[in-house]
Amino acid sequence: MTDFMTVITDTQLIIEKIKKGAMDIDTAIFNDLIEQHKSTVKTVTEMRNLFKGNHKILQKEKKGTRPNNRLVFNFPKIIILFALNYLLGNKHKYNIALNEDHPDYQKASFFLEEIKKINTENNEEALLREIYKYMLIDKRSWELVYIDSEGRIRLKYCPESEVIPVFDGSKDEKLSLAIRYWTEQVKESDVDEVRERIRIELYDEKMVYNYIQTEDNKFILDKNKPPYPHFFDEVPLIPYQNAIDESDLDDIQTLVNDYEEKRSERSNDLEYAADSYLWLNNVLLDIVNDDELTPQQKEYKIAQMINSRLFQTTDTVHYSDDDTPLILKATIQFITKELMVEPLKDHLDDLRRTIYQVSMTPSIFDQSNFSNVAEATLRLFFIPADIKADNNEPRLKAGIRKRLRLISQILFKKTGIHYDPTWIEVEFFRNRIINETELINNINSSYMSKTIDLQTAVEKHPLVDNPESVIERLKKEQEEKEQRYTQDWSLLDHGEMDEDEE
């Protein structure tokens, strides 16, 4: 269930008044919702700091003379970028889900061309990557579909920290309202002072309402931006929810902190050991023997020596039978600490493996050689990444289906033609290491045995980047070959072939 199901009752006043066309609503509820949303904003900030490398180890303070190395190992960025590129590293594709003999195939073709044009104008490939990246980091991403001043359909990413959804409480959790808010700076007309205020865009199934925050912390309708219709007949914000309903970084945060703590301490030990203490035993320095120094001054001087990695000791003086003091043996040596390497190394290796396992990320950086590995073995190695992708891919497709539905509604209002969003389907291609030689042999064998057709063989071929153009070229070459063959037989039938040609 969504985090905001508990506030639905509180927002019924907004919903009902908007439905009745009442604009002067009790906007105090906005402050309540923003206050409740702060916990989400805090979590999003923590997860994004993890991704950026702003980790707990950087807050560690220096103690005494001991080194204070603070090493950051950004596993979170590796994990997120691997998952992102595994699912979306290869360009996704929009296809017509109908057979060519379907009566609506021509309309579906036109709809697909419109989708491609809109995607190109909005750089949809980069947009979807941004949506998926922050879906993994923040737990949920949002996409806003709107019509710009020139009448074009626009697609925009919105972060989880700026969107407060209000669902209707049904089983399908239909979006009744969406509140999008952010902080902006405004300059007062009569003074030079700049102040911050919150701006709100409130979306329902028909309209968009703009509110601005006053100096007394209330919200009023923005007179410069009166309510306007968005024409989509449903709330035009699209949620993309992580399949595990939490950030991919939640479960590894403490593991990363421990790893960085241990590696930093190890670095401190090495640096400390490289600058060993110099021990002077029975080597009398002027500081110790200077009778003019007070005990406090001697103590301060000795502390200075220790800070300089040097300290002095004196053995107890022993005497012979005739009370003659025995000569003490003077020694000068460095004191080093024996570092326990193997236990720490085992612990760090175990932590690293656990981080990858918990995050369902193949530890490809621990593999020294991927050459000539059987395809079945590679598939087994990437099972964790496939599980994550299999869980999140339907979430992306669900969001894209709503986008197609919103676009089809606008096209219907423009052209009067109904376009069913189910006519179009999106296909993703996993980006993983493969055994190309084995895969190519399998494709060739399947094609020669007529198990797969030419189009499938070309699309699955690892060396083909643009299957459509390759298929078109192969068909053209086949047609030209057949024409030459037909022409040669025609000439032979009429006895017009040259002797050389015969």
Image (cartoon, rainbow, N blue to C red):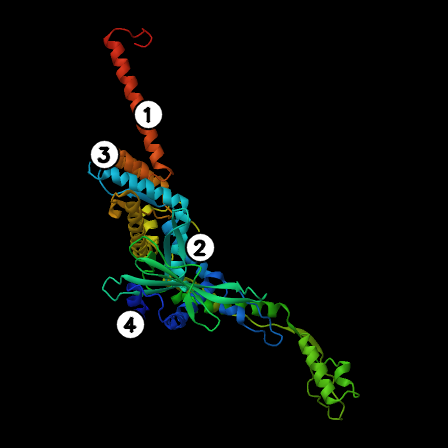
Disc 3 + disc 1, Cβ < 8 Å: no
The first of marks 4 and 1 along the sequence is: 4
The first of marks 1 and 2 along the sequence is: 2
Q: Write down the residue under mark 2.
A: 365
Disc 2 + disc 3, Cβ < 8 Å: no
Foreground: disc 4 or disc 1:
4
Foreground: disc 2 or disc 4:
4
Foreground: disc 3 or disc 1:
1
The amino acid type, in three-letter code, at marker 1 is Glu
The amino acid type, in three-letter code, at marker 4 is Thr
Q: Which mark is residue 1?
A: none
The first of marks 2 and 4 along the sequence is: 4
| Residue 121 screen position, x and y as percent | 41, 44
Q: Which mark is residue 477?
A: 1
Looking at the image, which residue sits at the far right?
292
Q: In the picture provided, is 463 more to the left or to the right than 444?
A: right
Q: Write down the residue under mark 4.
A: 9
